[in-house]
Amino acid sequence: MTRQELPKAYDFKSTEPRIYAMWEAGGFFKPHNDPNKPDFDPSIKPFVISIPPPNVTGELHIGHAMFVSVEDLMIRYHRMKGYSTFVGAWFRSRGHCHAINGGA
């Protein structure tokens, strides 16, 4: 058995375009229930994640990076499974700033 050496650093410039093209060609980014198509069924619910606004202090921490990564993973997974997906920002004065600004 031959031994293959792995590069010391990940070369995304040569890897990512090839994989992304494979995903696009396979239709992984096309929802099976597209609202722009005539066979759209509104009873099939999309996968939706609401993103909260920045915190009051304005300081980011590792938890923000972790949750954004998990949300991204969940959206990509559901999109590749054929679900319509949506990532939306929260509406004004909703989220963990809501109590501080008096619910306005």
Image (tube, rainbow, N blue to C red):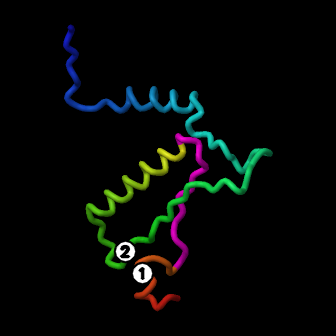
Residue 2 x/y as whole percent: 21, 9
Dot 2 falls on a residue whose secondary structure is loop
Q: Label 1 is placed on what type of residue?
A: Cys
Task: Check the image and name the residue furthest to the top.
Answer: 1
- Disc 1 crowd rating (10 Å Cα; few below 14, some 14-19, many 20+) is some
- Residue 55 is tagged as 2
Assess whether mark 2 and mark 1 are in contact (beta carbons under 8 angstroms).
yes
In terms of depth relative to the viewer, which is nearer, 18 or 13? 18
From this view, report whether residue 15 is shown above or below residue 50: above
Residue 102 x/y as whole percent: 46, 91
- Residue 97 is tagged as 1
Name which residue lies at 22% across and 16% down.
4
In terms of depth relative to the viewer, which is nearer, 90 or 47? 47
From this view, report whether residue 42 is shown above or below residue 20: below
- The image quadrant that residue 82 belongs to is top right
Name which residue lies at 37% across and 53% down.
69
Residue 79 x/y as whole percent: 54, 45
Q: Label 2 is placed on what type of residue?
A: Asn
Name which residue lies at 77% across and 45% down.
39
- The image quadrant that residue 31 belongs to is top right
Residue 67 x/y as whole percent: 36, 59
Between the residue at mark 1 and the residue at mark 2, the CA separation in whole angstroms equals: 7 Å
From this view, report whether residue 69 is shown above or below residue 56: above
- In the image, taking residue 56 as reference, residue 82 lies left or right, namely right
- Disc 2 crowd rating (10 Å Cα; few below 14, some 14-19, many 20+) is few
Task: Check the image and name the residue furthest to the front.
Answer: 43
Q: Which residues are magenta?
A: 80-92
Q: Is residue 75 magenta?
A: no
